Amino acid sequence: DGGRCWCECGRMGGGNAQKSATKRAKNAEKAAKSSGGKSQLAANQKAMSLTCSVCRMSFMCTMSEATLKQHTESKHPKKSFQECFPEFAAT
């Protein structure tokens, strides 16, 4: 028997930790090299071009007129659509 337990604890593991660490390092290098990254935050911030003139809430330029009218009706019921979004009404 030699003092070993039934599970053979004296053996080394499979080595997956080293594989994982190497993969993480390679992915970190690849992410550092990639230009621009994967973040959309800057592009999303630029697209926030519509602003309610009453409450200064920003909306993306792709918002439909119906959505903006819904904002006007729910948040500013005493104001007109043209008062809230004069730049949208002009287009």
Image: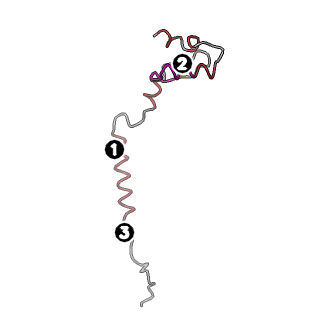
Mark found first going from the N terminus, 3 or 2: 3
Image point 57% across, 14% down: which residue? 81
- Which quadrant does the N terminus fall into? bottom left
Mark found first going from the N terminus, 2 or 1: 1
Amino acid at dot 1: Lys
Left or right of 82: which side holds 76?
A: right
Left or right of 22: which side holds 82?
A: right
Q: Does dot 3 land on a helix, a strand or a loop?
A: loop
Left or right of 7: which side holds 53?
A: right
What residue sits right under mark 2 in the picture?
51
Q: Which residues are magenta?
A: 59-70
Left or right of 68: which side holds 16?
A: left
Image point 46% across, 21% down: which residue? 61
Amino acid at dot 3: Gly
Which residue of the protein is positioned furthest toward the bottom in this rendering? 1
Q: Position of residue 72 (x, y in %)?
A: 59, 19
What residue sits right under mark 1 in the picture?
30
What residue sits right under mark 3 in the picture?
14
Q: Position of residue 36 (x, y in %)?
A: 37, 33
Q: Is residue 34 above or below residue 75?
A: below
Q: Position of residue 3 (x, y in %)?
A: 45, 88
